[in-house]
Image (cartoon, grey):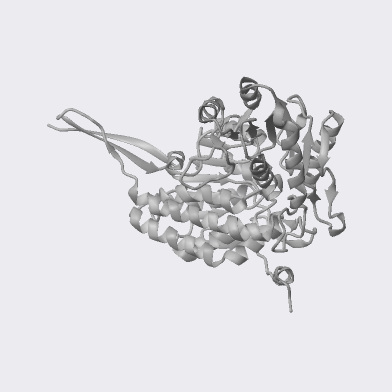
Amino acid sequence: MSTPSTAWHERAAGLRLDGRAVINGQRVAAVDGQTFAKHSPIDSRFLTQVARGQAADVDAAVMAARAAFDDRRWAGKAPAVRKKILQRFADKILAAKEELALLETLDMGKPIQYSLSVDVPAAARCIAWYAEAVDKVYDEIAPTPDTALALITREPMGVIGAIVPWNYPMIMAAWKLGPALAAGNSVVLKPSEKSPLTACRLAELAVEAGIPPGVFNVVPGFGHEAGEALALHLQVDAIGFTGSTRVGRRMLDYAGRSNLKRVYNELGGKSAFVVFEDYADLPRAARTLAGSMFFNQGESCNAPSRVLVQASVAEEFTALLAAEAPKYAPGDPLHPATELGALVDETQLRTVMGYIESGLSEGARCLTGGRQARTETGGFYVEPTVFAAATPQMRITREEIFGPVTAVIAFETEAQAIALANDSSYGLQASVWSDQLNRAHRVARALRAGTVHVNQYDEDDITVPFGGYKQSGNGRDKSLHAFDKYTELKTTWIRLD
């Protein structure tokens, strides 16, 4: 009898993958016929050829999206109608749960248990939540004298370009698609070339759910080709980008070089996890840190990779953290019990190993991990790694690693902890661990981050905004605030005689 792991491998072997773009509701090859080979980071197996979208393909998708917007086939529908169609879209995502989860795991290496329990349900919930919200967002009437009526209304922007990363392909896409589609926009999605498969499948499910052709298009390809063409396109009204700060700067440049389109960047992070000596349950804090840090192989923009611990408890806490790390030993991502999967590709593997070598050379002490793993598989795995005796000047404590590597820095006073936590070009998330109510509030207020967790980390929901300060980006994904990114405010002033 097959084990669950064997069953997933058998299903993977039997997949018939389609890497073509989805434009105007149809699967299409690239205009020039070019493709690129997609291999799985699990074991380097060949998955499929993927359409290599370039400027001509992006133009076709944008023109389809523009035509769909201009003839109002989607934007002109009543919000309650868009709601029902988007709810069907969410239902279809859930109905295809195992297929989508398998695609996600094969594409970028995360454990199948989390593709099933986190990624697919979160993407579906996001679409369903914005569907449910759209006919409950009211416009405004300004306080004018009797001689006037001033209406303040939200209108869809038009064509939205969404460029999303490879670490949470479905969830990041849904964070853009939910509010953009609910508001009545048309969308052209450019997934990462490292993880294009679920995006294309989502577009097919959207058409099946009743979203009109042309409203949601997907063009796979490379950033310097398809991504750049989308960001420069004069018929794109806004870009929602999630990715590196380096590329986020380019998005702003592309907007300046084209039509000054709105650009909303959700970029990197180097989140501080601050533990004070008054927090009584250090084992809980260590478990939480390990679970958050090693989830998704550390490939999370909000990974708590800067651990600031008060000196009096630093040694005890670091030992607890180091004891947690081996519980996340890398394993076969298609095995249902695996906690830590494969990094997305060899480039990312080399990047992470380079940071580990940098930490050692700069004098940090590696307590556990630090090595490549499962080399016999042909996949890209790194052991969960904990550094102690780190300093704020080291690369491992300043730069985003995007792998299962975290470093502990000791501090003496509350003021020093705040200064260290804020001493970063990023400001995405942070966490404060203290049993003193005043201290918890005081420090949370002082931290320059878009989200501050208190005595927890990573507890989250679609109802709260996600985004950061400083070079972590602008605008917010999730919550009702995301509608601000994909709508224009119009004032209509009517004189009353």
Residue 112's quadrant in the figure? Answer: bottom right
Quarter of the image with the N terminus in it: bottom right
The image shows a total of numbered marks equal to: 0
Considering depth in this image, is 279 or 49 the residue closer to the camera? 279
Could you tell me if residue 19 is visible in this image? no
Q: Position of residue 8 (x, y in %)?
A: 70, 68
| Viewer-nearest residue: 411 or 478 | 411
In the visual, does 350 lie left or right of 302? right
379 with respect to 475 (left or right):
right
- Given residues 403 and 213, the one toward you in this image is 403
Residue at point 54% right, 36% down? 451
Q: Quadrant of the C terminus?
A: top left
Q: Position of residue 360 (x, y in %)?
A: 85, 33
- Residue occupying the far bottom of the picture: 1
Residue 334's image quarter? bottom right
Residue drawn at x 79%, y 61% as measured from the top left: 45
Quarter of image, res 454 = top right
| Residue 232 appears in the rendering | yes
Q: Which residue is depicted at the point 73% across and 29% down?
A: 409
Camera-nearest residue between 446 and 262 = 446
In percent of width and height, residue 413 lies at 65, 21
Q: Is residue 253 left or right of residue 339?
A: left
Where residue 166 appears, as percent x and y from the top left, is 66, 49
